[in-house]
Image: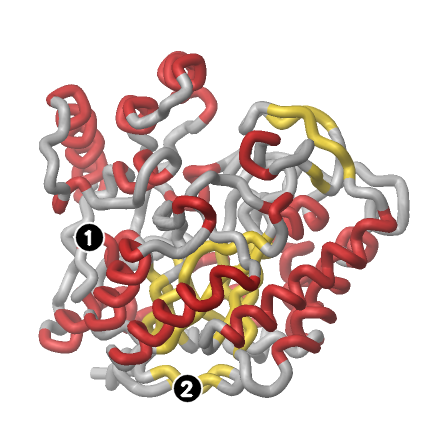
Amino acid sequence: MTTSKLFTPITIGPLTLRNRTIRSAAYESMCPGHRPSEMLLQYHRSVAAGGVGMTTVAYAAVTQSGLSFDRQLWMRPEIIPDLRRLTDAIHAEGAAAGIQLGHCGNMSHKNICGCLPVGASGGFNLYSPTFVRALRTSELPQLAQAYGRAVNLAREAGFDSVEIHAGHGYLISQFLSPATNHRKDEFGDSLENRMRFMDMVMNEVMKAAGNDLAVFVKMNMRDGFKGGMELEESLQVAKRLEGSGVHALVLSGGFVSRAPMYVMRGEMPIRSMSHYMKCWWLKYGVRLVGKWMIPAVPFQEAYFLEDALKFRKALHMPLVYVGGLVSRQKIDEVLNDGFEAVQMARALLNEPDFVNRMRKEEDARSACKHSNYCIARMYSIDMACHQHLSEKLPPCLQREIERIEAQSEKRQIE
């Protein structure tokens, strides 16, 4: 039997983790006023106390224009004392603290970001819904510098690492993908041109990170829909990032606005999602067309592994696997396939102590049943698992969750 690597230390850049587990940067929706709350602190403290090697705070906008939610972090000097309290709490439990930095690009609304949303290209974004302005070439250096400033703020706040979000259809991803980049200047058309904005950002990030902050980049292996980035181009992006000195890549996929369930898998509980929405027309619109806009993609454990193994073969740098890890057995398999670490979100939301339990039980498996209620809820209020709510769910939501969980269990048995 192969010896497990799971509970051995791993060094990534200047950072050494006590084990190979990382709480992935899944959006918590715990930052009213765009600043960290006591709820955010206590959640990440619980994950750190549960044995994880590092917990990653998600996701902090580098500018106000980069905000996509009204309960999302916005990196600015006035929140640093509160972030320092959070990182101190994480460190006190023996874990490292990471923060994901990004810009949502066209996936916002003036009511949230304070301006007409901007993106790689202009047009209309049905996701928000809103018109979008294409970023001017002259604006791009300043926006790249905002990433560098955010990295310096992360250091000041006590974080050990930053994770730059270059996937899921957010701004860097919008420049990379041929589906969202229709520019006619030097930042559009060929892949070489589409990587220019990413190159500008990473130059600023690596300068700011210096020798004491680890730099992770989350990127798409595939965009998950026809016309988007596919494996061949994404491998070239990964090699460019490897050459830039990035310490590790987090391999993901999907577009929040075009292929959301490619990212998360399973079915979105539409009734639960609309139940918590405050805007009446959006609530009923989602109920009416939600199934069409957010088609289900069957969940299977380690659903990105086949693609990720191709990246492992092509690259020499540390790689972090994320996507559908719910058991100690599969985590051991992934680590033995050559990945330096693994990321989890839903398993740790369901059970913050899951890593400690895996240390005791070789056959440990998460009790998450893949209803995605936590995701449906997070767009309006805090991310939470339905199995641990203090309030009682309305019967219609309970029935929806039970139906989705029963279907998910049946598929996995088959």
What residue appears at the point 48 percent right and 60 percent down from the top-left corner? 79
Q: Position of residue 14 (x, y in %)?
A: 51, 87
Using a 10 Å C-alpha cutoff, classify the residue at mark 2 as few (fewer than 14 neighbours), some (14 to 19) or many (20 or more). Answer: some
- The quadrant in which residue 265 appears is top left
Q: Residue 230: tell me if it is visible.
A: no
User: Under tag 1, what secondary structure?
Assistant: helix
Looking at the figure, which quarter contains the C terminus? top left
Is tag 1's residue or tag 2's residue first in the polypeptide sequence? 2
Q: Position of residue 26 (x, y in %)?
A: 39, 53
**What is the three-letter code of the residue carrying label 1?**
Asn
Residue 380, compared with residue 46, is above or below; it is: above
What residue appears at the point 68 percent right and 55 percent down from the top-left corner? 233
Say whether residue 361 is left or right of residue 257.
left
Looking at the figure, which quarter contains the N terminus? bottom left
The residue where tag 1 is placed is 350
Give the CA separation, mark 1 to mark 2.
Answer: 26 Å
**What is the three-letter code of the residue carrying label 2?**
Thr
What residue appears at the point 77 percent right and 37 percent down from the top-left corner? 134
What residue appears at the point 33 percent right and 23 percent down from the top-left corner? 274
Q: Nearer the viewer, residue 18 or 275?
A: 275
The residue where tag 2 is placed is 16
Say whether residue 383 is left or right of residue 176.
left
Q: Give the colour scheme of this rendering.
A: secondary structure
Q: Position of residue 329 (x, y in %)?
A: 22, 67
Say whether residue 324 is left or right of residue 226.
left
Residue 72, compared with residue 257, is above or below; it is: below
- Disc number for residue 265: none
Q: Position of residue 106 (x, y in %)?
A: 64, 37
